Amino acid sequence: MPTHPLARVGRRIAFAGAAALTATLALAAPAAAHAEVEADRPQALAENVTLSFVSEAESDSAGFTKLRIVLPEGIAAADVTLDEAPKGWKLTATSDGYSLGGPALKTGVDAEHKIKVRQLPDEKELVFKTVETYSDGEVSRWIELPTGGKEPEQPAPVLKLKAAAPGAKTVGPSPSGSTTLSPTPSATESEAAAAAAASDTDAKTAESDDNSSTGVIIGVVLAGLAVLGGGAWWLVQRRNASSQS
């Protein structure tokens, strides 16, 4: 039996609506950015290794002003020297690593810097938790690790290492006072904890706002589909009434 023309129109409307909904959901999803780390010699117990860090820009309205890196166990702040950084940015020691900041970068520009490490520890991989701050106060925290076989939404940068070279040994600690980093001027542990808590609250609020916006968009699309479906039904009924007259 041939398909009624109005039935074909109804199917086309439904298909177009589904495509529009899919496109809307895709546009509503946030763009993914990452923080990454690489090494010129990714090998356990390697000495004088250069680590390169890249924080991808994810804000459409602000640029990076600061990065905070948590050093893994086995690398002390005294073992780190700054190699390259954005113009005007300076390195400052923290209780668990270092911070790097200065004049705001342009919107959309990735934050890249390099440090030289006296020696890498004898491990299979190293985790460098990273907290990024933008000029508008937005904070992005790349500190999560895989759990239960699931990939985290904001994974911490991880550097995988090859086994140590035969005969490689751990060098002694850095001589006292040799560090090129200056101590953190006034930040306390309680202030750092408060800042972390505030950034978590901001992140949850932003996520809630994003979910609300997405719900409104989906609601509008579904309402449009309902109107289109009702119009197609009305056309079918009118055609049937005309045929019976």
Image: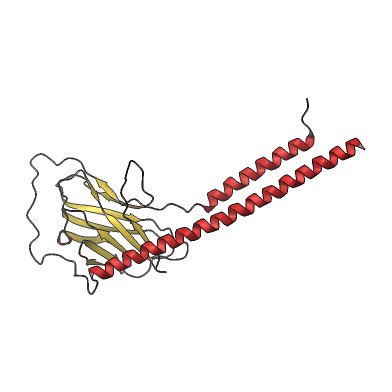
Occupied quadrant, residue 203: bottom left
Q: Residue furthest top?
A: 1
Q: Image check: 229 left or right of 243?
A: left
**In the foreground, 221 or 238:** 238
Q: Residue furthest right?
A: 245
Occupied quadrant, residue 58: bottom left
Identify the residue at horizontal 70%, vertical 39% (top origin): 12
- Number of disc labels: 0
**In the foreground, 22 or 211:** 211
Image spot of residue 123 (x, y percent): 18, 45
Q: Image check: 89 left or right of 46?
A: right
Identify the residue at horizontal 26%, vertical 57% (top origin): 114
Identify the residue at horizontal 36%, vertical 43% (top origin): 150
**In the foreground, 30 or 81:** 30
Identify the residue at horizontal 23%, vertical 63% (top origin): 98
Q: Is residue 5 above or below residue 200?
A: above
Q: Is residue 120 above or below residue 100?
A: above
Residue 91 seen anywhere in this rendered image of the structure? yes
Image coloring type: secondary structure
Image spot of residue 164 (x, y percent): 14, 42
Image spot of residue 79 (x, y percent): 15, 59
Q: Image check: 46 left or right of 63?
A: left
Residue 108 seen anywhere in this rendered image of the structure? no
Occupied quadrant, residue 71: bottom left
Quarter of the image containing the N terminus? top right
Image spot of residue 110 (x, y percent): 38, 58
Quarter of the image containing the C terminus? top right
